[in-house]
Amino acid sequence: MRTRNKNQMKKKNGDVSTGVKILFTLVVLAALFVIGTYVYSRLNNSATTVVDEYVRSFTARNPGRVFRTLNLKNTRFITADNLDKLLRDVAEYDKITSYSLVKLDESDDVCHYQVKYMVGRQESDFSQILTLKKTDESYLVFFKKWGIDSADLVASRVSVSVPLGAELTVDGVKLSSDSLRKKSQKMQDFELGDVFIGEHEYEIRLEGFEPYQGKFTLEAKDYLDEPVATVNTNKFVPDEGIKTVLENLTARIIPKIYEDLLQRRSFDFLAKEVAIEDSVKDGLMKRYDKMREDHVDTRTHLAFVDFESFKSSVRSTISTDDCYALKVDTKIRYTSHSTVVHGETPEMKAMSGKLKVSSIFHYSNGQWWLYDSDAFGRFVDYIKE
C-alpha cells in the first residue's frame, strides 16, 4: 500500500514539474519576443533610422521614397513628381554621389542632423539641416514615431488673383471653379493651397485676349490667402478677333457722331445708335453740344466730311470702375467741306487732313460700351474764312 502511494506521489510531482517548465518556457519566450519587438521597433523608428532612410532615398534619386520619408500628404501641388522637380532645381540631386551625416543635438522630442553631399570628389554647394520631431503616429501603443519636419519645403495658403471670368493654370494644372475663394466685380482669387517652395509658372486665359504667362517664387511660409500674384486686365494684349471688333466699332462711331452733329440731332438720338456707358453720358453730352455750338450752329460752319480711311491700334488700359477696358488709338484721313460766308455770299470750300482720336471702351453685360473718346472735342480741321 505504501509503495503505491509513493508511486502516485512521484507521478503527481512529475506532472507539476512539467507544467511549470512549459509555463516558464512560454513566459521566457514571450518576454524575449516583447523585448525583441521593442528593440527592433526602437531601432527602426529611431531618429537616426529615419534620417538614414531619407538620405539613402535622396542619393538614390527616388522621389517616391523621399516623399514618404518626409511624411508628406498628396495634394493638388504636393506630389512626388513636383518634389522631384524641386530637388533637381534646388539641390541638383541627380548629380549627388555620396553624403556625410552628423547628429547636431537631440532631446526627447526634437533633434537635428546635418547632411553634406558630395558630387564626385567635390562637396556640393547644397547641404541640409534636418529637423526631426515626434509625430502623432505611434508604435507599440505608447511610443511616438520620429518624422522629418518638411515645413521648410512648403508654402501654405497660396492664392493667385486674376480677372473675373479668366482661367488659371499653374505648373500645368488647370484650376477648377471649386478653387475660387474670393470674388469682386472685377477680380477673382484662386486658392492653390499648399505648394512647394521655389519658382512656379502660370498661364491666364481670358476670352478676347492673348494668353498671359508669368512666374512667381514662393518661400516657406503661410501666405494667409494673400495673392502671390495679381494680374489685372491692363497686362493683357487683345487678340486679333477683339481688335477687329473694336477697330470696326470705332470706324462706325466717329462718322456717326459727325453725321448726327451736322444733321443737328440731339445727343439722346446719338445715344440710341451708339452704346454709351450710362455713367459718362452727361459729360459726353456737354462736349457734344459744345461741338455743335462751335462748329455747326455758326455762320461759317462745317457742312459735311468725307472720311477716307481709318487705321487703329488696340491695347489694354486701366479701368477704375470694375470693367475690362481697351483703348483704341485711331488715325483718320478725311476731306472736310465747309460753308464759308463773306458778306451775304456763302461759298463751299474743301481741305484734306488727318485726325488722331483715342477712344476707350468698357466690356460689361456681354457687349462693348463707349466710355470716352476725344472725338467729342478734337474736331476735324476745315476752312473757316
Image (cartoon, rainbow, N blue to C red):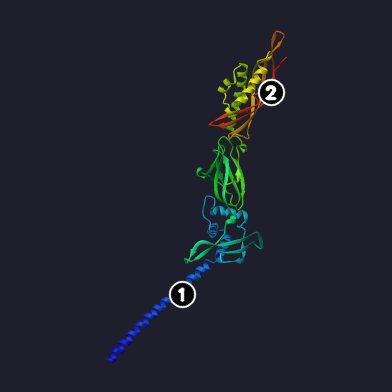
Dot 1: what SS? helix
Q: Classify mark 1: residues with Cα within 10 Å, few (<14), some (14-19) or many (20+).
A: few
Q: Quadrant of residue 298?
A: top right
Q: Is residue 33 above or below residue 305?
A: below
Q: Quadrant of residue 233?
A: top right
Q: Which circle, 1 or 2, is nearer the viewer? A: 1
Q: Quadrant of the C terminus?
A: top right
Q: Is residue 144 above or below residue 2?
A: above
Q: Quadrant of residue 161?
A: top right
- Foreground pick, 141 / 345: 141
Residue at the image point whose x is 32% and y is 87% from the top: 9
Task: Return the x and y of residue 231 as percentages of the image width and height.
Answer: 60, 41
Dot 2: what SS? strand
* Amino acid type shown at disc 1: Leu
Task: Return the x and y of residue 373 as percentages of the image width and height.
Answer: 63, 27
Sequence-earlier tag: 1 or 2: 1
Say whether residue 177 is visible: yes
Residue at the image point whose x is 50% and y is 69% from the top: 40
Farthest residue to the bottom: give it. 2
- Marks 1 and 2, how far apart in space? 102 Å
Farthest residue to the top: give it. 344
- Foreground pick, 34 / 286: 286
Task: Return the x and y of residue 49 as percentages of the image width and height.
Answer: 55, 66
Q: Classify mark 2: residues with Cα within 10 Å, few (<14), some (14-19) or many (20+).
A: some
* Amino acid type shown at disc 2: Lys
Residue at the image point whose x is 39% and y is 78% from the top: 23
Residue 89 lies left or right of residue 343; in this view the side is left
Q: Quadrant of the N terminus?
A: bottom left
Q: Which numbered marker is on residue 354?
A: 2
Query: Mark 1 — residue?
Result: 32
Farthest residue to the left: give it. 1
Task: Return the x and y of residue 343 as percentages of the image width and height.
Answer: 72, 8
